[in-house]
Amino acid sequence: MNEGTIKWVVTESGELVISPHTVKGVEISHAVLSGGKPVLAAGQAEVAGVGVKFVGMRISRFSGHFRPTAESVQVGREAFARHGITFPQQ
C-alpha cells in the first residue's frame, strides 16, 4: 500500500489539481497548483493506494496561501469523487 499527504485545489473551472505535499524536501504551495489564480477550494488530503485504486483517508481545507471556507471541503470531496476517490465523514 502506498500512502501520503497530497495538496489539492479545485480551480474556478472545477478541475481538481493535486500534487505531493513535498517534493525533494520542499513543500509545494497551493498557488503553484493553481498557477497563482483564484480557486473554488484548496486543502490537503491523506490517500492510500490499494492495488490500482486510491482510497481517501482524510481531507482538510488547510492551506497557507488560500483562505478556504469550511464549505470548500465539500467542494473537494465532490471533485475527488468524480475521480472515484471518496473520504469517510469526519
Image: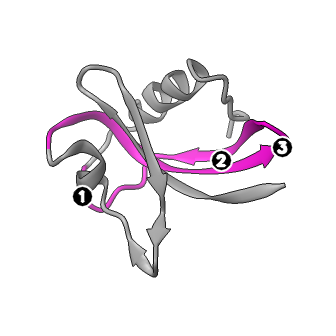
Total number of numbered labels?
3
Q: Nearer the viewer, residue 90 or 21?
A: 21
**Which mark sits nearer the N-terminus, 3 or 2?**
3
Q: Is residue 18 left or right of residue 66?
A: right
Give the residue type at disc 1: His
Q: Secondary structure at mark 1?
A: loop
Q: Residues within 10 Å of mark 3 (few under 14, many from 20)?
A: few
Asked if the residues shown at circle 3 and circle 2 are in contact, with their CB atoms under 8 angstroms apart, the answer is no
Front: mark 1 or 3: 3
* Magenta highlight on residue 88: no
Residue 58 is labelled as 2
Q: Which residue is mark 3?
A: 50
Please give the name of the residue rendered at 76% of the width and 46% of the height, measured from the top-left corner.
Answer: 49
Could you tell me which residue is drawn at 48 percent across and 63 percent down?
21
Residue at left 46%, top 78%?
24
- Residue 81 position (above or below residue 46): above
Query: What residue range appears in magenta?
Result: 37-66
